[in-house]
Every structure is written in structure tokens, then in C-alpha cells.
Image (cartoon, grey):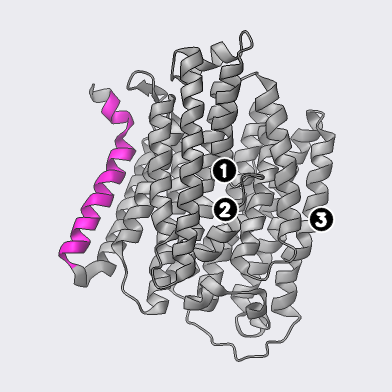
Amino acid sequence: MLNQFTIILPEIMLVIVAMAMQIFAVCFKECVRKVTVFTIALLLAVLCQMLYFAPEYSVGFSSSFVTSPTVSFFKTMVLAFTIMSVVVYRDLMKIKKEALRMEFVTLIILSTLGAFISISARDFILLFCGLELQALAGYALAAFDTKRSKSSEAGLKYFVLGALMSCLMLLGISFLYGFSGSIKFFEIREVLNGQFNIGLVVGAVLVLAALLFKLSAAPMHIWTPDVYEGAPISSVTYFAVAQKLGMLIVLINFVDGVVGDYLQISSELVKIVAILSMIVGALGAIMQASLKRLMAYSTILNIGYVLVAVCLHSRSGNNSAFIYMLIYAVGVMGFFACLVALFGDKSDVATLDDLKGIAKTRKTLAAAISIIMFSMIGLPPLAGFFGKYYIFYNAVAEGEIMLALIGVLTSVVAAFYYLKIIKYMYFMDSDKEIVAISTKRGLWFVTVLTVAFILFFFSFAPSYIL
């Protein structure tokens, strides 16, 4: 019994941090900023505990919860991005000279807790509970800025569509349970990979659709641009980075652990979604003026690349999918940190026109954004090049030449709007006065960390996934 609670120690610690800090913030309202700093310190302590005391492979709670060094590493990455999202929010509130709201930090921690549970879940009851905890906190985060009507609209859209997909997921789980007699991943996989059963196929497709919706994959992507545009930039930073990384691990667990070798779903269906995501993401961003909407379509495009690796249905494919998603998440985190540092309270409504002439007054931030954009294009020796190389190399090695070709072509199209950002910063003059905002230490730290990762990834780029 004690061992079972040992393997969920990170989750217990997150709950304690979230609840205790919220109580402190309520009791000592005048010290909320100090409470937030203390919360970040506690989250860093949880991160260190997970890094240095990673448990061996362990199964608990009737084989429904799994932990291992690999699982702990995935959770550590999600938590690291969570901490950076909290730092971005804290410094944004400093720039806006508004009071910090501890509820925001609590919601982010609870959403991260849901991601942790989902990553370790090996049965559908636990998986659904984890996903819903993550989603419910996400709905509140999207609508958190009550002063802007677009934020409320974003929260409502996200809630309605998310609730619909949760219902479809529950319907899919009921099919899987009804036709297999089990809610555990490995038992359902044995039945699904055996004699053909239409009920199990329908259930697996419905659950897969719900997971792809949360990943913003086309054609379940329709919520993404509107929610990204309307939600506060601190919430969007978390959605685009920590949530997406966690959901990728959940998708891989489902494809490998439940669908298995039923290739019509685990390979062919995912392949179709990958192609649609790459095309929609590449073409949809071309005409966007809002920077947050542009990054929403960029997310859809890059999820398409990730799904190319997932549909290969191999260990090397899954590894390259995770590495690519990690690299992209680092780039997005750095980009949004730069936006907050540049525009402050205007970052929620920043457009391409606002970037005009930025390079003349904010040289360092303009250079950081340029490095991030070049990485997203895939120029060597930046991290984005290695991410795309891993995926396209494995796709060609597995005989999926068409997928690799579509990926390369959409990368060329995407280069147009990534380069447009650089063009506006360096080669266009602003028709209005640029107000320089002093960059806070937290934003500098996040920016330097992400840019350094992109610049020096080549020095520790893994070769085992080739």
C-alpha cells in the first residue's frame, strides 16, 4: 500500500502546492507576489525530486497507474514548461502593474496534475479523469481575462467544443468496455488486435478523435485559432507548450497501448490526419495578421509533423515525435516570452504591424525572435533542423516518402510567414512611436534559456532515434 502512494508522490506534491499556496494567497492578500515566488520555488523542488529520485518501473492501483524513469522524464518536461508559463504570467502582471491572481497559478498547477495523471494512466477511467481535470482548468484559463469579451468568448467556445469531444470520448470508452469487457489498455489491445470487432473499432476511433482534438490536429482544429486569439497570452503559452507536450505522450500511449498493430487506425487514420494538419496549418497562417492566430496555425502545422512520426508506429518514430514536440515547445515558449517583453499589456492584441521597426530599438529581443523563427523553418544547425531531420529521415526509412515530401513542401510554405515576421522587424519602418518596456528578469531568463537550447541543441542532439 505504501509503495502505491510512493509512485504518485509527484502528483501528491502538486496537489499540496496548489492548495496550500491558494490558501496562503487568500489569507495574505498583500503578499501574493511573494506567495507566487514561493510557489515557483516549490515547483522547482518538485522538478528536482522527479529528476534525481526517478522511480524504477512500478505499477500501482490495480495496474491502472504506471511510473518509470521515462515517464518521470516526460512529466519533468511538462512541469518545466509549466514553471516557465507561471514566470511569464508573473512578469506580465508586473509590466501591466496589476495585482497577481493566485487562482491563475492554481489552475495551471491543477491542469499539470491532470497531465501527469493522463501520462501515467493505463486504464480509461483514470485517463478520462486526468484529461477532464486538465480540460476543466483549461476552460477557466481561456476565459480568465474577464475584462475582455474575446476571452469570455474563447472560454465558451473551448468549453462547448471540449465538452462535445469529452462526450464522444466517453461514448468511445463505453464501446471499448462493452465489446472487450475491460477498461485496461493491454486487455483491450489483445481483443482489438485479435478477431475483427466493429464495436472496438468504433470505440477506438472516437477516443482517438477526442485526443486529436486536444492536440489541435485537423480536422478537429477549428477551436484553436479562436481560442488562441481570445485567451490571455499567459494561458495560450501554457496551452501551446505544456498541454500539447503532455497530450502527445497520451496519444502515443493510446496508439501503442490500446490500438497496437491494428494499422488501419494506428497508422492509416493517423496518416490522413497528419496530411490534413500539415496542409491546413501551412495554408491557414498565410493571411493571418494576429500573431497569436498565426502561432495557432503554426501549432496545427507542427502537430502534423509530429503525427507523421507517430503514424510510423515504431519506437524510433515515437522518439522523434517527442524530440520534435519538445523543440517546437521550447521555440513557442521563447516566442511568447519575447512578445510579452516587447508589448506588455498589448501582447494579447499584437499584430504583424506592431513588429515594424522593432529591430532598431529592441535589438536583443528581435535577434531572439529571429533565431526562433529560423529554427521553426528548420535551418541548420538550429534545433528545429534536427527535429525535422529526425522525422523526415525516419519517414523515408519506413517507406513513407509521400509523407516526407508533403512535410518538406509545407515547410517551404510555412517559411513564408516565419520569414514575414523577420521582414517586419528588420526591413519595415514603424508609422508610430515604439514604446520600450523594461524587460523583467523572469522573461529574460526564459528567453535566454530557450534561445540557448535552440542554438546549442546540436551539441547534445540524440543519435539513437535514427
**Dot label at residue 129:** none
Instruction: Give the secondary structure at mark 3.
Output: helix
Instruction: Give the secondary structure at mark 2.
Output: helix
- Above or below, 431 relative to 348: below
- Above or below, 394 relative to 89: above
**Mark 1 or mark 3, which is nearer the start of the sequence?**
1
Q: Are marks 1 and 2 in contact (CB under 8 Å)?
A: yes
Please give the name of the residue rendered at 41% of the width and 78% of the height, measured from the top-left corner.
Answer: 96
Compare residues 347 and 455 and report the one nearer the observer: 347
Compare residues 447 and 233 and report the one nearer the observer: 233
Mark 3 vs mark 2, CA separation in Å: 25 Å
Q: Amino acid at mark 3?
A: Val
Q: Marks 3 and 1: which is nearer the front?
A: 1
Position of residue 331 measured from the top left corner of the image (x, y, whole percent): 60, 57
Image: magenta residue range: 4-28
Position of residue 72 measured from the top left corner of the image (x, y, whole percent): 43, 36
Check if residue 406 falls in the magenta segment: no
Direction from residue 180 to residue 108 in the image, left or right:
left
Q: Which residue is mark 2?
A: 223
Direction from residue 362 to residue 49 in the image, left or right:
left
**Dot label at residue 213:** 1
Q: Amino acid at mark 1?
A: Phe
Main SS, magenta residues: helix
Mark 3 vs mark 1, CA separation in Å: 26 Å
Please give the name of the residue rendered at 58% of the width and 47% of the height, measured from the top-left corner.
Answer: 326
Please give the name of the residue rendered at 55% of the width and 70% of the height, measured from the top-left corner.
Answer: 338
Say which quarter of the image contains residue 275. Answer: top right
Q: Which residue is mark 3?
A: 412
Regarding residue 139, the answer to whether it shows in the image is yes
Q: Amino acid at mark 2?
A: Trp
Direction from residue 340 to residue 418 in the image, left or right:
right
